[in-house]
Image: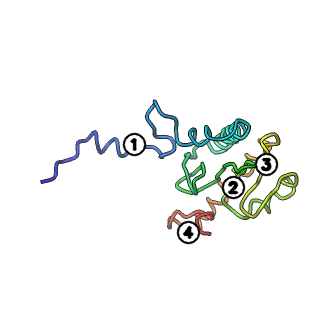
Amino acid sequence: MRAKKSAATTKGAATRKSAATATPTNRPSPIDAFLAKLPAEQRAALAKLRAQLRAAAPKAVEDFGYRLPMLRLDGRALVYYGAAAKHCALYPGSMSVTKAFAQELAGFKTTTGAIQFQPEQPLPAPLVRRIVEYRIAEEAAIAQRTKGGAKKSSAEKR
């Protein structure tokens, strides 16, 4: 015979946070651990980017996707960020971002899915905010079109 779950057990399950933020107080969050493994210059640049992203989307939840730190809003992927051997990168989660901001990104190396930058030449904070706002609007439009369908972002549909 199965034992009943206590009210405390079911209540605790309902209030759990994302895996990226729900950790015991004696351990760093997975995102903090990810950043701690990077060289100091990249760690500082991505910590600054992380703060800018969180300020631009205060209701978003930090998480991991594709082994990268990311922000989700209403279950939808907004942006990812990370570092490679010779650069840092913002992965906007949408191929339209680099086209929409092409003029402002002229000084940075871009691909259809990434904006690369050097730690000593980070993305300007106002540009980061506009990119996040663009992504929020883009994902809201997708959600509106699907009208409560599956919560797949444009990044997850690729």
Query: What residue is rendered at 52% in x and 62% in y?
Result: 151
Residue hosting label 4:
146
Q: Earlier in the sequence, mark 2 or mark 3?
A: 2
Give the label, 3 or 1, closer to the camera.
Answer: 3
Query: What residue is rendered at 79% in x and 60% in y?
Result: 100
- Residue type marked 3: Phe
In the image, 73: left or right of 111? Answer: left
Q: Residue 152: image x %, image y %?
A: 55, 64
Number of other residues with Cα within 10 Å of mark 2, as a class: few under 14, some 14 to 19, many 20 or more? many
Query: Front-most of 46 and 139?
Result: 46
Looking at the rendering, in which quadrant would you find the C terminus? Answer: bottom right
Q: Earlier in the sequence, mark 3 or mark 1?
A: 1
Query: Front-most of 92 and 55?
Result: 92
Q: Residue 56: image x %, image y %?
A: 67, 43
- Residue type marked 1: Thr
Residue at the far top in the pictured view: 26
Residue hosting label 2:
91
Number of other residues with Cα within 10 Å of mark 1, as a class: few under 14, some 14 to 19, many 20 or more? few
Q: Marks 2 and 4, how far apart in space?
A: 24 Å
Checking the image for residue 117, the label placed there is 3
Q: Marks 3 and 1, how far apart in space?
A: 37 Å
In the image, 77: left or right of 123? Answer: left
